[in-house]
């Protein structure tokens, strides 16, 4: 997968309702740590920034896992060039 393909996936419709009552942060981190065992995590006021996007792609992020992240409402943060989720 390349950056353009990941961004297209992440821009798709999420299926947030299937994660109601679940920790989307923890579930997303579990996916990310399959590829980057010790990712850089930077929490802010109401958002958590995690790992460089290109590093995650290079580590082998699959389309299926990218779709899961999207469905949990994770996103590509273009300002900081990382994955992010609002808490």
Image (spheres, rainbow, N blue to C red):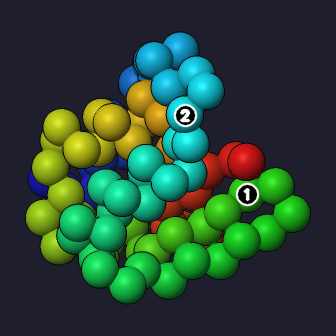
The answer to whether residue 31 is visible is: yes
Q: Looking at the picture, does residue 52 appear above or below residue 22?
A: below
Indicate left or right for 50 with 80 as reference. Answer: left
Indicate left or right for 20 with 27 as reference. Answer: right
Single out the residue that lies furthest toward the front: 21
Q: Residues within 10 Å of mark 1 (few under 14, many from 20)?
A: few
Tell me the residue at 28%/77% (across/down): 36
Viewer-proximal residue among 72 and 80 = 72
Spatial separation of the CA atoms under disc 1 and disc 2: 17 Å
Tag shown at residue 36: none
Q: Secondary structure at mark 1?
A: strand
Indicate left or right for 21 with 13 as reference. Answer: right
Tell me the residue at 39%/42% (across/down): 69
Q: Residue 4: x percent and y percent?
A: 28, 49
Q: Secondary structure at mark 2?
A: loop
Viewer-proximal residue among 41 and 27 = 27
Q: Residue 34: x percent and y percent?
A: 23, 66
Viewer-proximal residue among 30 and 36 = 30
Q: Earlier in the sequence, mark 1 or mark 2?
A: 2
Q: Looking at the picture, does residue 43 appear above or below residue 2?
A: below
Q: Looking at the picture, does residue 1 appear above or below residue 56?
A: above
Which residue is disc 1 drawn over?
Answer: 47
Which residue is disc 2 drawn over?
Answer: 22
Tell me the residue at 53%/15% (across/down): 17
Q: Residue 27: x percent and y percent?
A: 43, 48
Q: Residue 29: x percent and y percent?
A: 43, 60
Quarter of the view holding residue 12: top left
Indicate left or right for 42 with 7 as reference. Answer: right
């Amino acid at each position: 997968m390349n950056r353009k393909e990941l961004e297209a996936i992440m821009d798709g419709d999420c299926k947030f309702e299937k994660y109601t009552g679940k920790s989307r942060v923890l579930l997303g981190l579990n996916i990310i740590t399959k590829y980057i065992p010790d990712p850089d995590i930077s929490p802010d006021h109401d958002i958590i920034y995690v790992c460089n996007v290109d590093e995650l792609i290079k580590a082998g992020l699959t389309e299926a896992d990218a779709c899961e992240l999207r469905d949990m409402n994770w996103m590509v943060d273009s300002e900081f060039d990382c994955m992010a989720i609002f808490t």
